[in-house]
Image (tube, rainbow, N blue to C red):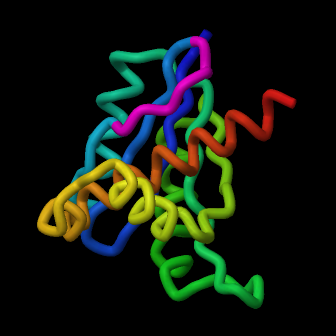
Amino acid sequence: MSRIVAIDYGKKRTGIAVSDPLQLIANGLTTVPTHELTTFLIDYVAKEPVERILVGLPKQMNNEPSENMQRIEPFVQALRKQLPAIPVEYVDERFTSLLAHRAMLEGGLKKKERRNKALVDEISATILLQTYMERNRL
């Protein structure tokens, strides 16, 4: 089987998570500067078989798209052109940052480590991916 990649897209940096080849477990991969994201993904796909790419869909509580959608949509359109063989789909990302902070707290990370925004982004992408895989396993 192939991996699934999940992206928590941000203005400055983007968290990336990846599944194992059997698509059972999500693991944080890294956080990259957003302006380097497309290059990173193209390089990753060249090295690893990837079945699909998930992009966090930023919605507000009233179900309206958040401000970040203005940046995400052009990125997704460009990514679909550059990697046409790999489906790119949106996945609701509401509460992933909150869940990431909670996981860090429950994991015993010190306050300084919990302030690491890059780590929060990577954990958010991991939660997004794990939730997607669990939902689609049913």
Residue 51 lies in the magenta-colored region = no
Q: Quadrant of residue 4?
A: top right
Q: With 107 as the anchor, is 66 left or right in this view?
A: right
Most foreground residue, 116 or 125: 116
Q: Is residue 47 above or below residue 117?
A: above
Q: Is residue 23 above or below residue 18?
A: above
Quadrant the C terminus occupies: top right
Residue 25 lies in the magenta-colored region = yes
Most foreground residue, 40 or 120: 120
Query: Looking at the image, which residue sits at the far left?
Result: 112
Q: Which residues are magenta?
A: 22-28
Most foreground residue, 86 or 28: 28
Quadrant the N terminus occupies: top right
Q: Is residue 20 above or below residue 10?
A: above
Q: With 79 as the anchor, is 109 left or right in this view?
A: left
Q: Is residue 90 above or below residue 45?
A: below
Q: Residue at x 62, y 45 (%)?
A: 88
Q: Position of residue 35 (x, y in %)?
A: 25, 61
